[in-house]
Image (cartoon, helix red, strand yellow):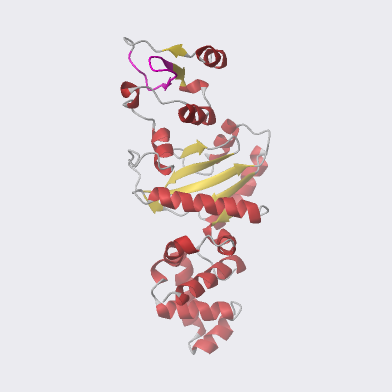
Amino acid sequence: MIDKLKQKYPNAFLQQQNIPYSSDHLYIKVSDKEIIGIPKDDLTEEESALLQVLYPVGDSRGADLPLTEKEQWRKFINKTSSIAPVTSWEHVRFIFFTVLSRETSQQEAEEAFLTLFPSDSIIIWNTPEKGVLIEPRSIESLKKNELEPVLAALESDFFIQFRLFIGSFFPIGEDLPEQYMIEEKSFSIGEQYSPENRLQNLSSTFPFLLARGLVQQYQEWFTSHLLGEFFDDQEMISTIKTYIECSSNASLAAKKLFMHRNSLQYRIDKFVEKTGLDIRGFEDALTVYLLIIIALSTK
């Protein structure tokens, strides 16, 4: 086994007891007495993950090696570690992606991504074509509708095609891995049922999740997260429900609600601003209406 590993990774070596461990190497225990060190630069993300599944990682000394920031994030979001990464960030969002251009290397894809997102964002590859970008919140963070023209220009400049899922910003805490899992599943369903939609988010995938029966387990999370502060605001919920039922016709909705059209428009604008869901368009209007029906049925 050692010979095969050395054949695959020529720079691999048998770790000696008197040699200190280095954070630049992955150490795997191939027998009770033998530990192989492999330079991390020689490993792809997939190879590293596979080796760590097949073999115990080092010994007690190796286990105490400081993890890179990327490794800390990988372990945390995949629930293999309950310890949150050491970072100055307070809020992050996950940008899940699939590289559709088969001849694109991971390095080329990363260079393209970092023209869209902050340069200190972390990119973790889960397969040769799929991964997640972890973006810290900043005043420069782009919304989904702002990303659409930028993504089109990026693909034109780099000749790379992507499918993206734009997650929400969450505080870094013990709930973050669960939120990561929900959004990752949402992207998977979105790719399966709406592959033509190259820029997705929780709102665009919600109807498919509902149809698949995947909302019920996290029903309260979806309704409270997407409706935000308006989840318990019966007056706002009633207003938005009526507006959508009137086919997003503000004049007709205002008549039904016995209010001035400007007052209704103010409420709509406030809802859109606070939730990020533009109910003036079909996609978000459908999701919000379904959410309202779910929320009302549970009260």
Instruction: Check residue 282 for magenta coloring.
Output: no
In this view of the protein, which residue sits in the foreground, 24 or 75? 75
Residue 194 visible here: no
Q: Position of residue 63 (x, y in %)?
A: 34, 26
User: For the magenta stretch, what is the residue range?
Assistant: 20-36
Identify which residue is drawn at 58% across, 33% down: 106
Identify which residue is drawn at 41% across, 14% down: 34
Q: How many marks?
A: 0
In this view of the protein, which residue sits in the foreground, 287 or 7? 7
Q: Position of residue 140 (x, y in %)?
A: 45, 49
Identify which residue is drawn at 47% across, 50% down: 181
Identify which residue is drawn at 39% across, 30% down: 68
Look at the picture and state if 242 lies above or below 93: below
In this view of the protein, which residue sits in the foreground, 102 or 274? 102
Residue 3 visible here: yes
Q: Position of residue 197 (x, y in %)?
A: 64, 55
Instruction: Check residue 25 for magenta coloring.
Output: yes
In this view of the protein, which residue sits in the foreground, 32 or 259? 32
Q: Position of residue 169 (x, y in %)?
A: 42, 53
Quarter of the rendering containing residue 282: bottom right
Q: Is residue 27 left or right of residue 88?
A: right
Query: Is the C terminus in the top left, top right, bottom left or bottom right quadrant?
Result: bottom left
Quarter of the rendering containing residue 252: bottom right
Look at the picture and state if 215 lies above or below 91: below
